[in-house]
Image (cartoon, coloured by chain):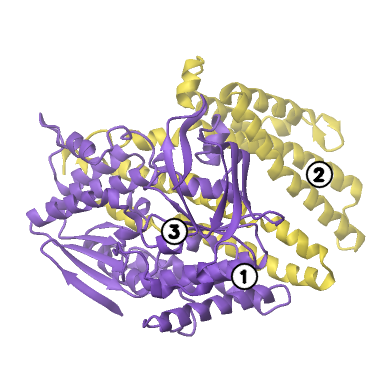
Chain colours: A purple, B yellow
Amino acid sequence: MIFAQTNNSRRETRFFESFEEREAAFNADVGRLIPGRYRGAHYFWRDFSRLTEGLDAARARVPAHITSNPRDCLAFGTAEQVLAAASMSAGTRVTGPDRPLEKITVQFGLEKVGRQPIRSLSGGETVRLALAKAMLAAPGTEKLVIASPFCWLSQHHLPLLETVEAKYADLGKPVRILAMAGEDSLAPLEAGWLTPADQSPQPFDLALERLHIQLGTPVNALTAKPALAGVADFHQTLASPCLVTGDNGQGKSVLAKALCGAAVARGLARVGSPGRSGRPRLLFQDVVTQTLLRSPAQMAAEFGGMNGRDAGEICGAVLEDVSNRLTQNGRMPETQAPGEPTLLVVKAMLIAVRLAALPSALILDEPDWGFARDKAIAFVLSVVRHCHERGVPVMLISHKPWWGPMAGSVLSVGKTAPRSERDLFGIRVERV
Amino acid sequence: MTEARKSNGRLPWPYDLLLLAVLAVPAFSGYPLANLPAQIVAGVRWSWVFYFAAIHLAAGLVLGRRLYANIVALAALITLPVVYAGAAISWVGFQLGLSGTGPAAAGSHYLQLCLTMLTVVPLALAMVSVVPFHRIEQSLLLRLDGVTATQKKILMAMRVFNHIAFFVLPGTLEVLREERPMARWRRQWASGKVARFSLLGRLPGHLVLLSAEIISASLQYVPLWAHEIARLPERRNGRTK
């Protein structure tokens, strides 16, 4: 169901209550060129097979677009290539004494990263590159379609989106934004969401010492000494839920992955409550990737067995709590259609599997991704509550301004100059 | 990597690839390895021992110490499970009377297999690693007046390869590191017979799902990339189409 639709002189924004509807609408706009992998491998193959049969017809309708993960729409190896290709395809003049391509590069802050591989760009640089590409594609397309820009755009980069919109408006071409309901809200969550149980912060320790996080990929590490990010030492007792903030590309996700062991790192990175064993667990921003070891169907089957009973109970409790919170705040709870689990169910399953193992901490990386604002708030509050009931502290990574009223403590993560000769850059964590 | 190698005075990568390709001819053709029957032990020929040494010497010189060491480690990780699992299955088959090949014959067979794999697997990995795929991709869009049809095909191949090598596999490794499935499976294995049977029943499904998800992730954006690359103006005979 489309929640709302707004139109101004520059953009048409359609808001959706569910991730599935937003994805379907985006895919319809881009000629169904993205098979629905989030629905599972079986459905992916079905969509992909149909797609390859009608590729020419599908391709003819594709407008300029930015996917919900901006990196996915960058089809070439370097930033320079992406921009050159966008210009060539749009028939834009890219050479000449006024050096139009270089102007765009400088305008979007990409002058230093033009020849770097896309994979080495930070989140912020990737966002700016996707916007610059859309800017250059304007003359050669009928419209621009953007999926959930407010999920990946920090406030710092919003003026660049407006610059792109202005360009399309000048050319008389529409910009269509497909977003989750409330995704663009800058208001903190309302007090009515919080119950007394939600306002009982729990202490936990975060210790970072001589920490260097390996960057790049294993393929890079095969051939050369890997680049590192050096993290400034940090030892503090914090209060859960701890909100971790910072602009795009400042190292928040890199740090989270180092804490839970998903990234290779040297040095000390410890988070948890005193006396609690276990290791930290992480809910990735891209939860679809996290189901590659266990599909929702497999998790559901495990929940019914002896080894998965705890996780099954947690999953059910989280979903019920989310539904109750939405109802109590005058919102529509999600209805579960038989068959494919929704993104909410998948996230609840992944949380339940992790929480049942009683980790030393649970880290949520942009947990609002794919959710309408109300559902995101209900989900996060429910997860925090169930974690606290089990004595598990929570770290919440987000660039959204919603979470202040619920945070027990706030950290700011930022990039700094390299801390040693081997570091590509440094990361500093500060308590706000 | 290539810049560092140039500063070390090594050959440009096409020469390295040519050298390794020439060295690969005996492995593909069997000549002259099959024509030299002298054996060092039963089933293992001197020709393969010398060939093994030649391949590793060439790979070490071409790749440099770090990459060579990593490739040897990878080759061992691939070879040893295959050889030991194959030998174990042969032994079980012999014990059950399903196979007439006894330990002596099977032993020399798997010894030669081990030597062969430890020769050809590093050779194959070396041939792939000398090719600077990222530089090739970067060199394909240097001209701003269009691309040829051949360059479009190479761009697509490079995109898929680089996406798998630098996004899909690293992302999969991150998820695996966070999940630590081996530790979880070890705990389940240790918790009793019922849990073991349950784990053995679910394990194939998990592995099939992992493979399917990796393939899906590798292919997911191929249609979008095909659209982007197809839209590039085509350059033919020095003119833009």
The reply to whether label 3 and label 1 mark residues of one chain is yes
For the C terminus of chain B, give its image quadrant: top left
Query: A247 or B161: nearer the eye?
Result: A247
Q: Is residue B7 above or below residue A144?
A: above
| Location of residue A249 by image quarter | top left
Q: Residue furthest top?
A: B9
Which SS class for mark 2?
helix
Residue A19 appears in the rendering: no
Alpha carbons under labels 3 and 2: distance apart: 54 Å
Q: Residue at x 42, y 69 (%)?
A: A376
Q: Is residue A43 above or below residue B227?
A: below
Residue A362, x across and y down, in percent: 58, 59
Mark 3: give few (<14), some (14-19) or many (20+) Cα within 10 Å.
Answer: many
- Identify the residue position indicated by label 3 in the image: A366
- Identify the residue position indicated by label 2 in the image: B109
Q: Is residue B204 above or below residue A217?
A: below
Left or right of residue B128: residue B114:
right
Query: Which numbered tag is attached to residue A389?
Result: 1
Sequence-first disc among 3 and 1: 3
Which SS class for mark 3?
loop
Residue B134, x across and y down, in percent: 42, 36
The amino acid pointed to by label 2 is: His
Q: Nearer the viewer, mark 3 or mark 1?
A: 1
The amino acid pointed to by label 3 is: Glu
User: Which of the chains bears the disc numbered 1?
Assistant: A
Which SS class for mark 1?
helix
Residue A63, x across and y down, in percent: 21, 60
Alpha carbons under labels 2 and 1: distance apart: 60 Å
Left or right of residue A40: residue B98:
right
